[in-house]
Image: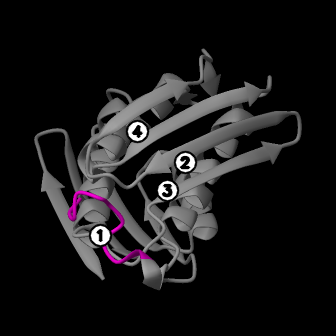
């Protein structure tokens, strides 16, 4: 189990995870829809995940969502690298009713995010723009090169949930054991 903590004037966060878990989640960020998305991520990645965040949600949810992304990314980086004997690349397209979102990633230890989801508005009290902030924080802090693209969809809830599930499944596939891979790079290191 990997544990990372972060305390600022805006948030106090603790994230614990086990990569080869069963998808158990204990999530409390103070942001209901975000909790639901993190639970879905854990379930479909098979990562056991615990997230506790006390944030300044009286201002808005931005600091909590972005900072959880930072700490989750740091925990993933610690758990993944140095990388060896895994597939390294993963991709998934996830359908939720009328929506379809694709995620492709490389566990390259070179962070990058292409975020091809352009939706405005809210899901309940959750600002949809925070989804981009979360994935950007995760990718940059985890050292993952990732492309998340909306293929089609209208319902904001379905689109965001499909994005979290596509991220989960792509990560699960990238982390799939591959004994023959050794260090999966011609460079000899990642």
Location of mark 3 (residue): 89
* Residue of label 4: 134
Left or right: 162 in relation to 72: right
Q: Nearer the viewer, mark 4 or mark 1?
A: 1
Question: Of marks 3 and 1, which one's residue comes earlier in the chain?
Answer: 1
Q: CA distance from mark 4 to mark 2?
A: 15 Å
Instruction: Kindly state the secondary structure of the residue where label 4 is placed.
Output: helix
Q: Are marks 1 and 2 in contact (CB under 8 Å)?
A: no
To which quarter of the image does residue 84 belong? bottom left
Mark 3 residue crowding within 10 angstroms, few (<14) / some (14–19) / many (20+)? many
Q: Is residue 83 left or right of residue 6?
A: right
**Labelled disc at residue 63:** none
Q: Say which of marks 4 and 2 sits in front.
A: 4
The front one of 189 and 155 is 189
Q: Is residue 11 magenta?
A: no
| Of the image marks 1 and 2, the number of the one nearer the N terminus | 2
Element type where label 1 sits in the image: loop
Q: Which mark is residue 83?
A: 1
Residue 23 place in picture, x, y as percent:
57, 76
* Element on which disc 3 rests: strand
Residue 188 point in image, percent of width and height: 22, 65
Disc 4: CA contacts within 10 A as few (<14), some (14-19) or many (>=20): many
Mark 2 sits on what residue? 32
Res. 147 visible in picture: yes
Q: Nearer the viewer, residue 26 or 185?
A: 185
**Highlighted range, magenta:** 181-190
Mark 3 vs mark 1, CA separation in Å: 12 Å
Please say if 83 is above or below 9: below
Q: CA distance from mark 3 to mark 2?
A: 31 Å
Q: What x and y, as percent, mark residue 190?
A: 23, 59
């Amino acid at each position: 189990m990997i544990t990372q903590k972060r305390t600022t004037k805006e948030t106090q966060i603790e994230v614990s995870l086990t990569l080869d878990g069963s998808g158990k989640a204990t999530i409390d960020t103070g942001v209901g829809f975000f909790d639901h998305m993190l639970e879905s991520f854990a379930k479909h990645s098979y990562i056991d995940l615990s997230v506790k965040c006390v944030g300044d949600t009286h201002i808005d949810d931005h600091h909590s969502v972005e900072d959880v992304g930072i700490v989750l990314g740091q925990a993933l980086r610690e758990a993944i690298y140095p990388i060896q004997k895994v597939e390294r690349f993963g991709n998934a397209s996830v359908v939720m009713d009328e929506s379809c979102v694709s995620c492709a990633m490389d566990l390259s230890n070179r962070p990058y995010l292409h975020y091809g989801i352009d939706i405005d508005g809210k899901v309940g009290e959750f600002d949809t723009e925070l989804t981009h902030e979360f994935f950007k924080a995760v990718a940059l802090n985890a050292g993952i090169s990732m492309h998340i693209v909306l293929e089609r969809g209208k319902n904001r809830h379905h689109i965001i949930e499909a994005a979290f599930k596509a991220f989960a499944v792509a990560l699960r596939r990238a982390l799939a054991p591959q004994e023959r891979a050794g260090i999966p790079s011609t460079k000899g290191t990642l």
